[in-house]
Image: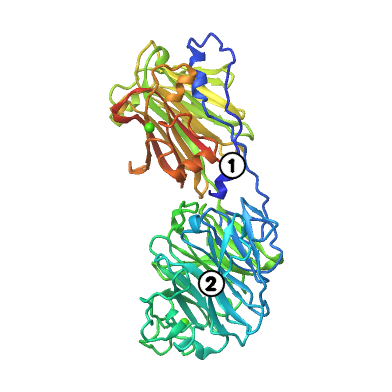
């Protein structure tokens, strides 16, 4: 479950049984019910917006899960989307569906003096089946030492007595430099970052595990392919890399499996290190890159100096690669690495391809951990104000115009389209009905003379147009000013300012002509608080160029728009359509025509099925198609066709979710 999707709420399906003004000579009733199957008004979800940090233009943040009730140290997303947060004092808190649960997952007895405490969390790669959660914490009873234990989850709490101690590390002297981060690598092994406990010589010896990255089997045993398995002895064979001071955070890049280690420096340099088996990162001989090149040491990929400025600090934390399942941020962030400085309160972005870092956020109150969530947003954990999580998102884009193209027949086979304006202020739209100009796009047999009608959701007529120059001079000027003048005088256009609600558009051939027609709905009022949220198009779906096509442009903001596209056929029978498309297929393509995602039946992919169901947009028939996607600004095309060349009446729907 993706928490962001589960926040969506939908109203009931809408039906319209109003009377049609007979000046529109169409068999109205049989159409309009079919158009609105499943369409629903989408209420905006309002977040309480706090402004703790200063973010780049186009980004916003919201507090996530309420105040944590104690200074936090680390966090991790469970594979099911819950966010688990370690409090230094020993509580593991759970944020579920955006709310902090009252009961901690577990409350450990820990020693939390200085930098000790509950410091790290990881979920087993097979968590869905084994429910294993791993924690790194400082024991409360003498001899004080750090420990890695495994717990078994039962829902939102640990099974009492389920703790299995996997690793007991060396006894501690100093309270600081504990490390504490634990993560599973792409190889299914458990990696742990351990500080040198303020004894710098620990970092360079293979005789203890302090100042190291360790690599373990999930059950705590030591893999025999570890780099020092044959040179170190006993428990020290777990050492995977050495020469670290206080590697408080590290991260693996999804997809590539590349590992970056953030090593907190002493008085001069904070480091981002390339995690490579067997490496020695140089501490304490070198802090930052070695002034005297040393072939035995691996210098950092990036380092920054100490200070209190926008590029300096005193302790690096992180560590989050931007490679999420869905790209909510602009494409320029993909593959970048977020890191933060707990002292200076900023978050910056490191570009592994250039080796340079750039600003992201400032004014964060004591950041200690960063993660990119399953929703593609950046989550940061801050120690200020008693401990808080914030969720940073790029302001979502939205469809700005949507079109439907299909064969337009006569009688019952004209094209019927619907759109929705969400709650908010009235919005000006321009509709176009195109035919002859499709010839320029090499569409054969275009509709020679389109006629366009706009109706309110209750069926009452609002406007009609045969040829766009039939409009008043003022309306024609409006169409021209928006660069939407049709290139052929026989094509149609309507200018309308419409209140939030549902609308229906009909395109047919003047004089009972037929051919391929294109209906377009343009949002020409970007200042309105309402959104053009949906469009549907119902038409006879044939083969070749006569399939049903919807095009849409996503824009206005920098973040991804949340979109669901559906291809409907058999459920149109409920509306009395006897020749519906028996088995629709659906494709979503980008502006280069490249396939983004295709779907035959909406339950084919369990993850897609979950998202679609949670959105309340599950098709009524198992043969029908649906796709749930986040789309960054750009131009997209959805194509509904019949499986194996089938034909019949089909419905394409594009939904923009808030
Ligand atoms: Ca180093
Ligand atoms: Ca016309
Ligand atoms: Ca199908």
Q: Residues within 10 Å of mark 1 (few under 14, many from 20)?
A: some
In-front residue for pair 404/217: 217
x, y percentage for residue 440? Answer: 30, 29
Any part of residue 316 in sight: no
x, y percentage for residue 618? Answer: 50, 34
* In front: label 1 or label 2: 2
Q: Which residue is mark 2?
A: 181
Q: Is 123 left or right of 643, judged from the image as shown?
A: right
x, y percentage for residue 593? Answer: 33, 41
Q: Which residue is painted at 59% across and 72% down in the image?
A: 119
x, y percentage for residue 437? Answer: 34, 26
Q: Is residue 319 above or below residue 468?
A: below
Q: Is 112 left or right of 547, judged from the image as shown?
A: right
Residue 238 sits in quarter: bottom left
Q: Is 455 left or right of 216, judged from the image as shown?
A: right
CA distance separating discs 1 and 2: 33 Å
The secondary element bearing badge 2 is classed as strand
Q: Quadrant of the C terminus?
A: top right
Give the numbered dot on residue 8. Answer: 1
Q: Residues within 10 Å of mark 2 (few under 14, many from 20)?
A: many
Q: Earlier in the sequence, mark 1 or mark 2?
A: 1
């Amino acid at each position: 479950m993706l928490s962001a999707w589960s926040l969506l709420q939908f109203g009931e399906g809408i039906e319209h049984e109003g009377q049609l003004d007979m000046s529109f000579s169409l068999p109205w009733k049989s159409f309009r019910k079919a158009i609105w199957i499943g369409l629903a008004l989408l209420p905006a979800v309002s977040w309480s917006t706090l402004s703790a940090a200063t973010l780049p233009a186009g980004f916003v943040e919201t507090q996530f899960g309420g105040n944590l009730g104690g200074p936090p140290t680390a966090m991790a997303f469970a594979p099911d989307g819950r966010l688990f947060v370690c409090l230094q004092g020993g509580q593991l808190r759970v944020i579920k569906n955006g709310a902090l649960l009252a009961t901690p997952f577990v409350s450990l007895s820990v020693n939390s003096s200085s930098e000790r405490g509950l410091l790290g969390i990881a979920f087993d790669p097979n968590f869905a089946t084994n429910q294993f959660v791993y924690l790194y914490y400082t024991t409360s009873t003498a001899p004080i030492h750090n420990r890695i234990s495994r717990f078994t989850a039962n829902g939102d709490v640990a099974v009492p007595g389920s703790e299995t101690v996997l690793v007991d590390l060396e006894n501690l002297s100093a309270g600081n430099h504990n490390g504490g981060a634990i993560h599973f690598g792409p190889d299914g092994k458990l990696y742990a970052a351990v500080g040198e406990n303020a004894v710098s010589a620990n970092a360079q010896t293979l005789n203890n595990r302090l100042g190291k990255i360790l690599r373990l089997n999930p059950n705590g045993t030591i893999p025999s392919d570890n780099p020092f398995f044959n040179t170190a002895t006993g428990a020290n064979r777990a050492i995977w890399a050495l020469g670290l001071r206080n590697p408080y955070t590290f991260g693996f890049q999804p997809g590539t499996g590349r590992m970056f280690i953030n090593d907190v420096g002493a008085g001069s340099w904070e480091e981002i290190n390339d995690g490579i088996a067997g490496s020695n990162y140089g501490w304490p001989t070198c802090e930052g890159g070695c002034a005297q090149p040393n072939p035995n040491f691996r210098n950092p990929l990036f380092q920054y100096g100490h200070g209190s400025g926008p590029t300096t600090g005193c302790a690096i934390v992180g560590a989050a690669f931007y490679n999420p399942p869905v790209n909510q941020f602009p494409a320029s962030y993909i593959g970048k690495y977020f890191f933060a400085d707990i002292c200076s309160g900023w978050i910056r972005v490191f570009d592994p391809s250039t080796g340079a870092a750039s600003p992201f956020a400032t004014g964060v109150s004591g950041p200690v951990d960063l993660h990119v969530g399953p929703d593609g947003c950046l989550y940061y954990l801050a120690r200020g104000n008693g401990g808080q999580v914030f969720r940073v998102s790029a302001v979502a884009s939205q469809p700005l115009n949507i079109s439907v193209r299909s064969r337009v027949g006569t009688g019952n086979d004209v094209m019927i389209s619907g759109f929705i304006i969400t709650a908010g202020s009235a919005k000006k739209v321009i509709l176009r009905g195109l035919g002859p100009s499709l010839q320029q796009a090499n569409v054969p047999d275009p509709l020679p003379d389109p006629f366009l009608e706009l109706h309110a959701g209750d069926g009452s007529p609002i406007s009609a147009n045969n040829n766009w120059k039939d409009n008043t001079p003022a309306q024609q000027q409006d169409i021209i000013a928006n660069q939407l003048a049709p290139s052929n005088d026989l094509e149609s256009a309507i200018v309308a300012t419409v209140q939030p609600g549902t609308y229906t558009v009909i395109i047919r051939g003047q004089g009972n002509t037929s051919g391929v027609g294109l209906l377009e709905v343009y949002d020409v009022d970007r200042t309105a608080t309402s959104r053009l949220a949906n469009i549907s198009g119902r038409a006879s779906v044939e083969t070749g160029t006569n399939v049903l096509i919807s095009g849409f442009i996503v824009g206005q903001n920098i973040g991804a728009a949340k979109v669901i596209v559906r291809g409907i056929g058999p459920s149109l029978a409920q509306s009395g359509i006897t020749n519906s498309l028996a088995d629709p297929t659906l494709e979503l393509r980008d502006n280069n025509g490249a396939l983004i995602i295709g779907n035959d039946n909406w339950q084919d992919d369990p993850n897609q099925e979950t998202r679609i169901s949670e959105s309340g947009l599950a098709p009524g028939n198992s043969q029908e198609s649906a796709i749930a996607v986040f789309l960054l600004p750009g131009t997209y095309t959805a194509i509904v066709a019949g499986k194996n060349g089938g034909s019949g009446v089909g419905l394409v729907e594009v939904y923009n979710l808030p």
